[in-house]
Image (tube, helix red, strand yellow):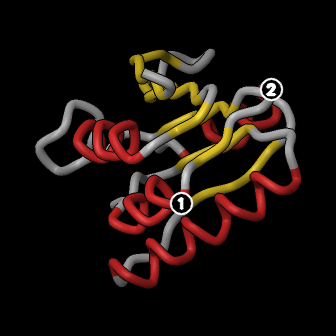
Amino acid sequence: MPITFSMATTPSGKPYVRSIASGVIDVADARHSLNELAPSGKYNGLPMLSVMEEGVSYTAEARREFRDLGTNPAVAIVVSSVALRVTLNFVLKASSLRNGKASNNKFFTSETEAMTWLEAQIH
């Protein structure tokens, strides 16, 4: 799968979900991700560090599917591509509007900065 999930712990021992996206993300990948993060999913309600590897892209169908993304307590997103950052920001805002819930997402260019922010968000 171009999006993988795993459990991890912050430097201070707090649990979070680590996701890594690579390659072309299609609608099947989006549905798999939504299932993992859904209320009945393995990673629901957990803070997340999401890493977008160089060259990752999302099909139009996958972007539409992510409109149904719920909200996690905090999501730190590591992405180096400005174009992808703009696209993901739009998808996340559309999801928040559609679900009527504000999201706690922040974009970063380095995992170190992302982890520092994420750890500060976890209570």
Closest to the camera, between mark 2 and mark 1, is 1
Q: Earlier in the sequence, mark 2 or mark 1?
A: 1
For disc 1, the neighbor class at 10 Å (few under 14, some 14 to 19, many from 20) is: few
Q: In this view, does 70 lie above or below 51?
A: below
x, y percent for residue 64? 44, 66
As measured in the structure, the alpha-carbon distance from the residue carrying label 2 to the one carrying label 1 is 30 Å
x, y percent for residue 70? 33, 61
Residue in the foreground of this view, choosing between 72 and 122? 72
Which image quadrant is residue 100 in?
Answer: bottom left
x, y percent for residue 89? 67, 65
Taking the spot 76% from the left edge, 52% from the top edge, the residue there is 84
**For the view shown, which residue lies furthest in the left direction?**
40
Where is the N terminus found, in terms of image quarters?
Answer: top left
Q: What element carries label 1?
A: helix
Quickly name the residue at label 1. 60
Q: In this view, does 10 lie to the left or right of 56?
A: left
Q: Is residue 47 left or right of residue 79?
A: left
> Looking at the picture, which amino acid does disc 1 mark?
Ala
Residue in the foreground of this view, choosing between 68 and 123? 68
Q: Is residue 123 left or right of residue 34?
A: right
Quickly name the residue at label 2. 112
> Looking at the picture, which amino acid does disc 2 mark?
Thr
For disc 2, the neighbor class at 10 Å (few under 14, some 14 to 19, many from 20) is: few
Q: Is residue 38 above or below residue 13?
A: below
* Number of numbered tags placed on the structure image: 2
Which image quadrant is residue 57 in?
Answer: top right
Residue in the foreground of this view, choosing between 38 and 3? 3
